[in-house]
Amino acid sequence: MRRQKKFYAWGYADEDLTADEIAAWEAPIARHYGLAGFDVTPPPTAAEIVLRPPRVAIPAALAEVVRDDHLTRLEHSYGKAWFDACRMFMRTVPNPPDAVAFPRNEAEVVAVLDWCDAIGAVAIPYGGGSSVVQGIEPTAAFDKVVTISLREMDRVLEVDPVSHAARIEGGVYGPHIEDQLRDTPFTMRHYMQAYRCSTLGGWIATRSGGHYATLTPHIDDFVESMRVITPVGALETRRLPGSGAGPSPDRMFLGSEGILGIITEAWVRLRKKPTFRAAHAIRFPGFDHGARAVRDIAQAGLYPANLRLLEAREALPGVAWDNTDALLMLAFESADHPLDAWMARALEICRAHGGSPEPAESDDSPQRAGAAGAWRDKFIRAPHYTEHAVARGILAWTFETAMTWERFDAFHDSITATALDTIRRVTGRDGTVTCRLTHVYPDGPCLYFTLGGILDRRAMLDQFMDILTTCTAAVVEHGGTTTHHHAVGRFHRPFYDRQRPDLFAEALRGAKRALDPKGLMNPGVLIDP
Amino acid sequence: MRRQKKFYAWGYADEDLTADEIAAWEAPIARHYGLAGFDVTPPPTAAEIVLRPPRVAIPAALAEVVRDDHLTRLEHSYGKAWFDACRMFMRTVPNPPDAVAFPRNEAEVVAVLDWCDAIGAVAIPYGGGSSVVQGIEPTAAFDKVVTISLREMDRVLEVDPVSHAARIEGGVYGPHIEDQLRDTPFTMRHYMQAYRCSTLGGWIATRSGGHYATLTPHIDDFVESMRVITPVGALETRRLPGSGAGPSPDRMFLGSEGILGIITEAWVRLRKKPTFRAAHAIRFPGFDHGARAVRDIAQAGLYPANLRLLEAREALPGVAWDNTDALLMLAFESADHPLDAWMARALEICRAHGGSPEPAESDDSPQRAGAAGAWRDKFIRAPHYTEHAVARGILAWTFETAMTWERFDAFHDSITATALDTIRRVTGRDGTVTCRLTHVYPDGPCLYFTLGGILDRRAMLDQFMDILTTCTAAVVEHGGTTTHHHAVGRFHRPFYDRQRPDLFAEALRGAKRALDPKGLMNPGVLIDP
């Protein structure tokens, strides 16, 4: 029996934060803003939301594959961003898909696409639906929409123990990959906050960022080959460890966000499960000190698995809001060798920039101790807070980018200032902005900003969109990428248009016309027809 | 004064191997094949080769930029493969470019492309002309051909000492990059056999493979952003350390082989010049033992700069032809930390597979000692031997591929057998085939095969082409890539067509139509119009 997902917010219908968790989160926010407490909007029930009747009729041949019941359509209407939950709490779902297909194999994927083609319906490929950028959301412009969920195609088909790779179907959720690898020495180890409810195919289509802070931050770095069903046929790239034969076909589909076809399976690289681990949390007297240590470690060729720099007020419970310390979570892992030399040199670099290691944590303890452990638990639970923030009119959301180091300080300062100014302008009172570095390249980091504030309940969606779009526009104006690992979707589209060369859009449009001549596939994402 | 390149073979007109070098190379070959010696065809002089008169008239506005003198056209007619030198020694150049442009800036690149467009000439972008795959060779099908050499655009324009990167013009030769970085702490360190006479733009267009055996084998891994002049305009990608915003624009031009536009400059990653180095040569009792050590090292996450496995008979002077030992050249380098822990673990892995370290070499000695040093010197001089092989009818050439580990042994054996059989079939006597591993991924190596034999002087071009195409066809048939880092060009085109998905060709054709609607740019390479 498939576990029902929560249609209006993150996670499954049968799970939620505990009352204690909510109180421990809500009380300091109320205190910070001098509020007695929050009015809480109850979450919507499915019955409260009226959907337009389906505009397509499911053909008999697809009766087992396609559904158009109310809850299924509702569940597939929005992604999982703050603004998605907000619209659900407003009971506003004007553009649901008309039907949702759950093909069980490639033949059924083809049959569903053929049906879309025959009836002139837009086809929206759907992985776990964890998009935070309106990547899987139908718009009012579509006459008919069929969302195609790959969730029935969820098997690890083959494990290659010699090359350390596996052939995996596109619709598998993160944990189910690791479940199926349990009896092997291998792990894929591409974790992210949305890991529990996102899929391999979705990761590939959106260039997801995972567990590894260095070397292999993106899913791009895992893919050996893939199979894609396009409206004009199936395509399979050759499984190779590396090649120089023309532009990489895989790289055309990595980040294609469903506009070229549906990724049904891929060969991906695995690793042996790590048996050696060295981890430290290091406290720095300022984010800038920590950032310089991160830069030096990234440029030293040490390649830690974790190199995550957090502001103390974001990382540590009970830290005063004016605390300017930063906390670096540093970890090396290996299935091959002890990591003392690696960690010793990385700690030397940290000390040179004023870092002090916190008391050592034991990573293997069932209850992970220390600042890093506390932060990690919070990180994994974080998506559950969004619905409670929405229910209270609390601004609690993030955006991420990447930028080269030479402009890092100025960039960090100006984005922070823009975000603070914007929250003040829009909400009429001061908010909070913190930053963390999550993935790091020798030439620059991924910056992840977290916004906090109190919105006006009567206009909170507009306020939220104003704040987020103003911040994202500033990111692109100051030279960052509109997204480092959350994809473009419909939300980032105007900013993406400023960032990517116009002639690349022309080239991509040319490629799309070849694979999707009628423009069925997720139109409006990345490019216009 | 620009140093004149040798029009008929590798290198500059004023350099050659010494008589002693030639004798030391030629004598063992003659001995091996039981020959008294070789007839030697003298190299061609420019005057001996008749070229069709230019079919284009250089407009007055481009008089300073475009040349059509005999030697310039001759120099730009072929690449540097064995079959190129062979045709030069045959004094056969039926399809020279009609003119060669040497634009000094982007405005002149645009002017030249506009001129090509106006007169309906094919435009062939040209870096150092070191192609070994007919990548820059005009064909009989072209009515008019203008080759566009970027050699006048050879500056390092900007160095970013914080992010460790530089903005560099596309036409700069390898050594001139390092010359211009001499007063900085940085190096690009993307070396390959053709380094002396190949360019950054050429590397990007062909996905060259360089110095690093692991982590950053291809130029792909160095590129932050680029500028490209296409027939419909200029395009500049955003300089970023990483991004997830749609399919990577850079990756569309990496490997585009001149069919989409001309790469005029790029931001590329640099590193600090290494100050720590640990190097060993390790002898294995068999190539298969060495290959398993290479695989384990690649999968261990140690990331050596060099991890090159050679058959002893290829690596060591005076080794008997039936010797089946293999030699691994293993080196770590760093500008940050001593490498003892890295090397100790790698040597442990080698010993577990039966490897014995040779006496330690001192890499800093002016005269590099040991087997690895000897092999490296030979490697850098190797391209000079091609013309002497051609002059004697000696088959001496290589081809490379990459393949996942799980089929490695069978693949290695079957390609070796095919090559030996083919040389015997074509030349009527036994030849030699050796293999080395040059670049290594966790999931597979790049295999580099070297062919040896004696050709019939009256039919040697046909014999050579028969052997090389048969071997390349076998590579693709057995699941390898037709090229790991030598590009597709016109030579690999039929094999590339079997390897890459047809629908990817359609997509690439769509992209090309958007950027090069009249099909001026290097037609027939990668795709047909």
Image (cartoon, coloured by chain):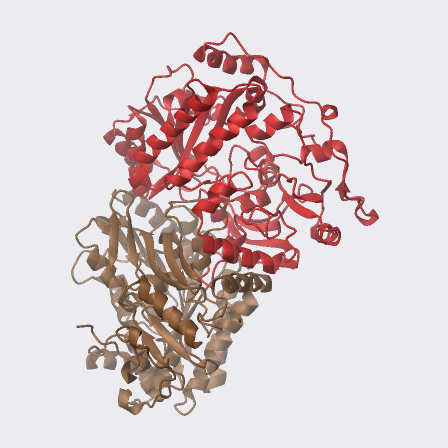
Chain colours: A red, B brown
Residue at the image point whose x is 35% and y is 71% from the top: B148
Q: Is residue B39 visible?
A: no
- Image coordinates of residue A446 in percent, x first then y, are 40, 37
Above or below B207: residue B31: below
Above or below B375: residue A104: above
Residue at the image point whose x is 26% and y is 33% from the top: A348
Between residue A67 and residue B437, name the one nearer to us.
A67
- Left or right: B478 with respect to B266? right
- Left or right: B306 with respect to A397? left
Above or below A352: residue B82: below
Among the 4 quarters of the image, the one containing residue A407 = top left
Residue found at the far right of this picture: A60
- Image coordinates of residue A351 in percent, x first then y, are 26, 29
Q: Is residue B180 visible?
A: yes
- Image coordinates of residue B239 in percent, x first then y, are 36, 48
Q: How many marks?
A: 0
Name the image quarter holding the N terminus of chain A: top right
Between residue B388 and residue A527, name the one nearer to us.
A527
Residue found at the far top of this picture: A36
- Left or right: A305 with respect to A463? left
Among the 4 quarters of the image, the one containing residue B178 = bottom left
Between residue A281 and residue A18, name the one nearer to us.
A18
Among the 4 quarters of the image, the one containing residue A156 = top right
